Image: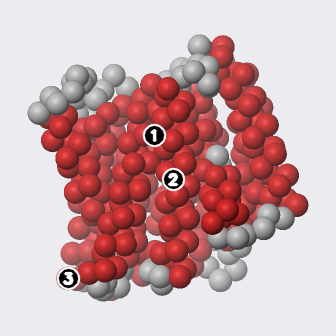
Amino acid sequence: MHWIVASLISAFFLGLYDLTKKHALRDNAVVPVLFFATVCGAVIWIGLLLLGQTNPGWLPAAFKPEPLTLAQHGLIFLKSMIVASSWAFTYFGIKHLPLSLAAPIRATGPIWTLFGALLLLGERPSGLEITGIMITLGSFFGLSVAGRAEGVHFLRNKWVGYMIAGTLCGAVSGLYDKFLLGRAGFSAAAVQSWFTLYLPIVLLPLAVGWWRRWWPRQEFHWRWSIPLIALTLLIADFVYFDALRNPAALVSLVSSLRRGSTLVAFAGSIWLFHETHGLRKLPAVLGIVAGIILTVVG
């Protein structure tokens, strides 16, 4: 498969990932949806790892993690804690906000990762990156103005705060990925498989608290979109790694094309969930995507 096609397919499934989350969370309890989605992801990875043990030739290289030491497992467990925090915040945000607002907010993650790289890793932005940051921030303001038509005031709405907190945690995860995959020398398969397996363990206390009614909570309804959350993310990541394995692939362009997931989620939210004011939000959404692409390419 050509790496550009693979990148676009990955973007499509990332958009579906957001749509399946929104479907699973509508009028549903957040904590069990989050917990069971991570359990489904862990079950998929257990199946893949067992397949790799019994039939090594059937498993693609992207899904073959190397053996790890106890200390290395500890580093990945920390990754799971960061991801669990990010997902918990964003799941609550996606449940209570229109996806046509939540998905673009989540898409600003690379901007915050870049800020972290500037502050913590001493990186210096190029002219394109600075331009991309300014366009993204300006479009983010435009999105906040469009959101007021739906009664969502960015400075006063706590669910917007949840989405921003989840996005910032995701940016921390991105910086930590740079450490794990770069300085620490982990393979992508090791990080992806083990942090997915550890996620249900990290979230188990929260799930027990929900089940024991330690706080007022909504009832849970099983939906088949819950396992689809795990499946769509797995497919998106697998096709993404397949694109990166191509020697001709340009990493910056692959990452930029993946930002198209925001447009998939935006269009799906209007078509499937009948969210309103789509045309009013569209310029801001396109601006965010353009800004992120400039930042990544720069």
Instruction: Name which residue lies at 35% across and 57% down.
Output: 81
Residue 209 numbered mark, or none? none
Instruction: Name which residue lies at 80% across and 58% down.
Output: 129
Look at mark 3 in the image and give the residue it sits on.
54
| Cα separation between marks 1 and 3 | 37 Å
Kindly indicate whether the residue at mark 2 contacts the one at mark 1 (C-beta within 8 angstroms).
yes
Q: Which residue, as the protein is rendered here, is positioned at the far left?
A: 212
| Cα separation between marks 2 and 3 | 35 Å
Camera-side residue of 95 and 272: 95
Report x, y in % for residue 155: 62, 25
Report x, y in % for residue 263: 64, 41
Earlier-in-chain disc, 1 versus 3: 3
Label 2 secondary element: helix
Q: Amino acid at mark 3?
A: Thr
Kindly indicate whether the residue at mark 3 contacts the one at mark 1 (C-beta within 8 angstroms).
no
Q: Quadrant of the C terminus?
A: bottom right
Look at mark 2 in the image and give the residue it sits on.
170
Label 1 secondary element: helix
Instruction: Name which residue lies at 55% across and 39% down.
Output: 164
Q: Quadrant of the N terminus?
A: bottom right
On the picture, is 261 further left or further right than 203?
right
Label 2 or label 3, whichever lies nearer to me, is: 2
Q: Amino acid at mark 2?
A: Gly
Instruction: Name which residue lies at 26% across and 45% down.
Output: 35
Quarter of the image holding residue 189? Answer: bottom left
Report x, y in % for residue 179: 52, 74
Earlier-in-chain disc, 2 versus 3: 3
Residue 90 numbered mark, or none? 1
Q: Amino acid at mark 1?
A: Thr
